[in-house]
Image: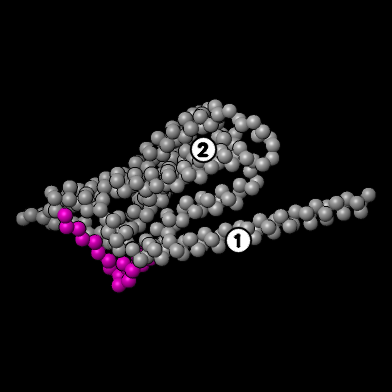
Amino acid sequence: MNEKIGTDIEDEVEASRAPLMEHLVELRMRLIRLVIALIIGFGICFAFAEPIYNFLLVPFEDAAARVRDGDLSLELIFTAPLEFFFVKVKLALFGALVLAFPWLAYEIFAFVSPGLYKNERGAFAPFLLGAPALFVAGMSFVYYFVLPFVMRFALSQEQIGGENSVSIQLLTRVSDYLNLVTTLILAFGLSFQLPVLLMLLGGAGIVSSRQLMGSWKIALLGIFVFAAFVTPPDPISQLILGSVLMALYGISIAGVRMVEKRPKPAGADAES
């Protein structure tokens, strides 16, 4: 009897070993393709690093023109010989991540989809498109609203020198401005994924709209702690991100409620 049990266990282990190796091989191939996509994206972004950086400077230039009474001149500095070169390298890496984000979402979906039912794959597919779209929406919100607002506030702290006062002017390092831009884009781009995440959890039955509504006070605290952690150390961007996240939390509750009301497709228990 014991020998039969031992044989059954060995057969089960052997049966599971082959699928495990197949999954590992598939995972390796998908990671290799993702690395290739990142390398290609890095090459493209590095070749156009200066135009991309100049494009990111547009909100700063507009803010300077408004605060300085139409003066379009803008001066950024670097204080180390290779600082601007490494800024372009960092910008190319960041651009490669942004360009590869849709491919990353596809690779994740393609890897997990064989283990999903047909109706689950159909439910997951809209989120595959929604995640990159919301990330782009977060980037656009930073570029067209947050950055101009933050930079106008920063430039408003300048002091024009006169006979009895010292001139105080903002001279921003190229690396500091890029750090601000990339930090805000990542913070808002990832934060805009909140509806996708909560709707997926709602569709899986892990959370409900009633639970989300009942936990809004805890969510409020967590959101502003998160905003203080991921944004630069200034209260303006923290308040903006916290307010946006609370709005997204409300949208997520409505989205989860829609998912809950959606009728389950026939054959949900059938295998794909």
CA gap, disc 1 and disc 2: 29 Å
How many numbered markers are drawn? Answer: 2
> Residue drawn at (57%, 58%), measured in percent from left and top?
30
Q: Secondary structure at mark 1?
A: helix
Q: Work out whether 200 lies above or below 187.
A: above
Name the residue that disc number 1 marks.
28
Label 1 vs label 2, nearer the camera: 1
Amino acid type of the residue tagged 2 in the rendering: Leu
Q: Is residue 18 left or right of residue 226?
A: right
Q: Position of residue 84 (x, y in %)?
A: 31, 67
Q: Is residue 130 left or right of residue 83?
A: right
Which residues make up the magenta segment? 72-89
Q: Is residue 47 magenta?
A: no
Q: Position of residue 19 (x, y in %)?
A: 71, 55
Q: Which mark is residue 198?
A: 2
Verify CB contact (< 8 Å) between mark 1 and mark 2. no
Q: Secondary structure at mark 2?
A: helix
> Residue drawn at (43%, 45%), measured in percent from left and top?
133
Q: Position of residue 79 (x, y in %)?
A: 28, 68
Q: Is residue 20 left or right of residue 144?
A: right
> Residue drawn at (45%, 63%), measured in percent from left and top?
40
Q: How dense is the environment of label 1, judged by Cα within 10 Å: few (below 14), some, or many (20 and up)? A: few
Amino acid type of the residue tagged 1 in the rendering: Arg
